[in-house]
Image (tube, rainbow, N blue to C red):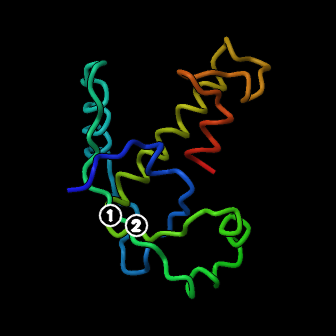
């Protein structure tokens, strides 16, 4: 097994695409509750293991047809297929988006730009750039 990777490593310069043969996002309340329970019961000195994520580089010939994302590919983003782990990867992205929305709506951040709102050691603009956009 390869080394375990952090979310930073997984999201760094990747352009995720779901292959046509994959089903759509299907997690329901049960899976989301289990995900949340895993996160809140995790002690502060531990990391959450999200399971295996299998990605495969998209062949250059297929990537060349990705017109709307060509600007990202020119900036060295690597287009990859998510072969396994789509449900978890999507849930993590949704979760991070929800955290961003809560941070923006908190009374202590009223009137602040994303670059002025900090969560941990990163400002919200950096978090969104790294994990959402």
Q: Earlier in the sequence, mark 2 or mark 1?
A: 1
- Residue under the point 48% across and 69% down: 80
Disc 2 to disc 1: CB gap under 8 Å: yes
Q: Residue at position x 70%, y 17% from top?
A: 109
- The single residue placed furthest to the left in the displayed view is 1
Q: Is residue 48 above or below residue 111?
A: below
Q: What residue lies at 68% left-to-right and 35% top-to-bottom?
A: 125
Q: Position of residue 88 (x, y in %)?
A: 35, 51
Q: Is residue 77 above or below residue 33?
A: below
Q: Which residue is mark 2?
A: 82
Q: How many marks?
A: 2
SS label for mark 1: strand
Say what secondary structure mark 2 lies in: strand
Q: Position of residue 75 (x, y in %)?
A: 70, 62
At x 25%, y 33%, the residue is 38
The single residue placed furthest to the bottom in the displayed view is: 61
Q: Which residue is mark 1?
A: 54
């Amino acid at each position: 097994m390869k080394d375990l990777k952090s979310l930073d490593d997984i999201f760094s310069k990747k352009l995720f695409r779901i292959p046509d043969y994959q089903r759509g996002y299907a997690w329901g309340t049960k899976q989301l509750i289990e995900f949340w329970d895993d996160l809140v019961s995790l002690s502060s000195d531990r990391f959450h293991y999200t399971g295996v994520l299998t990605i495969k580089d998209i062949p250059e010939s297929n990537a060349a047809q990705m017109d709307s994302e060509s600007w990202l590919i020119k900036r060295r983003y690597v287009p990859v297929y998510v072969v396994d782990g789509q449900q978890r990867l999507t849930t993590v992205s949704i979760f991070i988006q929800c955290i961003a929305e809560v941070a923006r709506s908190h009374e202590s951040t009223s009137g602040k730009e994303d670059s002025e709102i900090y969560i941990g050691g990163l400002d919200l603009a950096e978090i969104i750039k790294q994990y959402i956009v």
